[in-house]
Image (cartoon, rainbow, N blue to C red):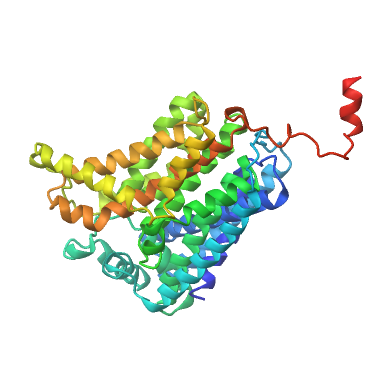
């Protein structure tokens, strides 16, 4: 049950993804894969948020866990049933450039995926309690949430080492699995870390395949799996991987909404996922606000649907910070006056960007080589997701500049994880730009010349007469 509890969230979230996510003009396996990944992300975030809200309302952990599952499942099924009879927004069919020797990319992605799954599984078994943040912050607070009558200890100001001011979505997700199983075993946070990492990769692959096709999706996925910090952070059971999953899901849902003429349902789904990020870590709250501003500039008044989707969990997040979380000043004016700290932060972030991979398999270097080789024409579209991810990194850098703690310690312990939160979005945008047929000198699949000996379709021949 500690493992099954994570998979059942996918069923609850699938109805929401099926009902709200615009359908791409792509093969069925791409549509179903993206819906499954989006359903897992929504289910994990939705059930955890409702579980904590019900705990706060006075339910026991076991009752809150099962009620949260039922609430997300029933409400999602109801929304899906109501929208089945109506018109479902569909994404426009993008034109993707042909990727030379694309079959090699498929083989590389399959090999990288198998290695990542095997490596993450072995490392999780070898270190069942995860790294420092897992057993000292997220999992210990989950234990309080899973014990009847003790959930308020998770926000006790006396437990300063556990950061009681941090939001509780990831701890609530682990506690929900424990409450449903009735046993506090290491398998719950282990399975959660594994499922979230796989969901992040599937989200990336399906979000890229929906716009660029199988070969580009395979090449992009192989590049993502070159990222060293993803391999290290997943078995560490950090909350940064769930945060990266919610950030990526919110961007993919918003981009799908844009292709469907700024679909209201797609924007609402994006807002919900961004609000889950806000209740996961403070950086997620910054991203939720940044993405709202980016969509307000791109979608104009339609961005109100994003706010509508984000509102329920954003209200819960605001109430948590206002009524429960102990006050703890984060920033110091004296730190902002030290320009040397800013220089150290920028230098440290640049060093972590270079440490994303190891030569010769370095994801950043590989993407730069691809951009140089294919040279997509400016303006690159869509640009707003990359701008939102870069602004998130800028906000993270500003916080490290302004906190009172030693800046070198901050860089050593957190810089790589902060970069991981935005890296999948930046990588996704780069491959969207690379695959855009109108930005290439390479013909798209629809424009590629027919092979000798093949006859053109009759409809095409008739259209030329």
Which residue reaches farthest top?
465
- Provide residue 459's location: percent of width, then percent of height: 89, 30
Residue at x 92%, y 32% (from the top left corner): 458
Give the x, y percent position of residue 167.
Answer: 32, 54
Q: Residue furthest front?
A: 452
Q: Nearer the viewer, residue 120 or 365?
A: 365
Q: Is residue 334 left or right of residue 274?
A: left
Q: Is residue 183 visible?
A: yes
When the figure is inspected, residue 3 is found, relative to residue 227, above or below; the finding is below
Looking at the image, residue 165 lies above or below residue 159: above
Residue pictured at 40% horizontal, 49% vertical: 277
Where residue 440 appears, x then y in whole percent?
59, 30
Residue 413 in the figure: left or right of residue 119: left
Q: Is residue 267 left or right of residue 35?
A: left
Residue 178, can we see it? Answer: no
- Front residue of this view, candidates 405 and 18: 405
Total numbered labels: 0
User: Viewed as shown, does residue 233 lie left or right of 16?
Assistant: left
Q: Which image quarter holds the C terminus? A: top right
Compared to 458, does 428 lie above or below? below
Please give the name of the residue rendered at 39% of the width and 78% of the height, measured from the top-left corner. 126
Report x, y in % for residue 273: 47, 47
Which residue is drawn at the image coordinates 23% and 60% (left, top)?
Answer: 163
Q: Nearer the viewer, residue 40 or 56?
A: 40
Query: Looking at the picture, does residue 59 appear above or below residue 100?
Result: below
User: Residue 324 falls in which quadrant of the image?
Assistant: bottom left
């Amino acid at each position: 049950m500690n493992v099954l509890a994570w998979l059942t969230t996918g069923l609850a979230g699938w109805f929401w993804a099926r009902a709200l996510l615009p359908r791409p003009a792509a093969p069925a396996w791409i549509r179903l894969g993206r819906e499954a990944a989006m359903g897992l992300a929504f289910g994990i975030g939705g059930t955890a948020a409702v579980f904590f809200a019900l705990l706060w309302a006075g339910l026991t952990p076991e009752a809150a866990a099962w009620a949260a599952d039922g609430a997300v499942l029933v409400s999602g099924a109801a929304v899906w049933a109501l929208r089945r009879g109506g018109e479902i927004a569909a994404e426009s069919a993008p034109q993707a450039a042909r990727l030379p020797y694309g079959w090699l990319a498929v083989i590389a992605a399959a090999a990288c995926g198998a290695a990542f799954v095997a490596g993450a599984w072995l490392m999780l078994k070898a270190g069942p309690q995860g790294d420092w943040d897992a057993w000292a912050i997220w999992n210990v607070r989950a234990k309080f949430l899973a014990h009847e009558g003790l959930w308020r200890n998770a926000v006790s100001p006396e437990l300063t080492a556990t950061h009681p001011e941090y939001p509780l979505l990831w701890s609530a997700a682990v506690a929900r699995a424990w409450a449903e199983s009735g046993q506090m075993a290491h398998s719950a946070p282990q399975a959660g870390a594994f499922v979230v990492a796989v969901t992040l990769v599937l989200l990336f692959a399906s979000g890229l395949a929906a716009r660029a096709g199988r070969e580009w999706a395979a090449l992009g996925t192989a590049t993502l799996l070159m990222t060293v910090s993803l391999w290290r952070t997943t078995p560490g059971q950090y909350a940064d991987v769930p945060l990266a999953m919610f950030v990526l899901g919110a961007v993919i849902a918003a981009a799908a909404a844009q292709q469907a003429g700024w679909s209201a349902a797609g924007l609402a789904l994006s807002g919900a996922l961004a609000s889950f990020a806000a209740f996961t870590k403070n950086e997620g709250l910054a991203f939720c606000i940044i993405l709202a501003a980016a969509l307000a500039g791109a979608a104009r008044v339609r961005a109100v649907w994003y706010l509508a989707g984000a509102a329920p969990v954003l209200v819960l997040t605001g109430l948590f910070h206002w009524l429960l979380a102990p006050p703890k000043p984060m920033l110091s004016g004296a730190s902002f006056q030290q320009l040397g700290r800013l220089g150290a932060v920028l230098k440290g972030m640049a060093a972590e960007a270079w440490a994303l991979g190891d030569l010769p398999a370095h994801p950043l270097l590989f993407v730069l080589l691809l951009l140089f080789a294919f040279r997509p024409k400016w303006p690159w579209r869509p640009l707003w997701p990359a701008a939102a991810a870069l602004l998130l990194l800028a906000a993270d850098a500003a916080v490290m500049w302004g906190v009172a703690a030693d800046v070198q310690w901050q860089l050593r312990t957190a810089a790589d994880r902060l970069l991981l939160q935005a890296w999948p979005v930046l990588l996704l945008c780069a491959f969207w730009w690379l695959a855009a047929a109108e930005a290439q000198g390479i013909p798209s699949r629809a424009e590629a010349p027919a092979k000798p000996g093949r006859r053109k379709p009759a409809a095409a021949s008739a259209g030329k007469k």
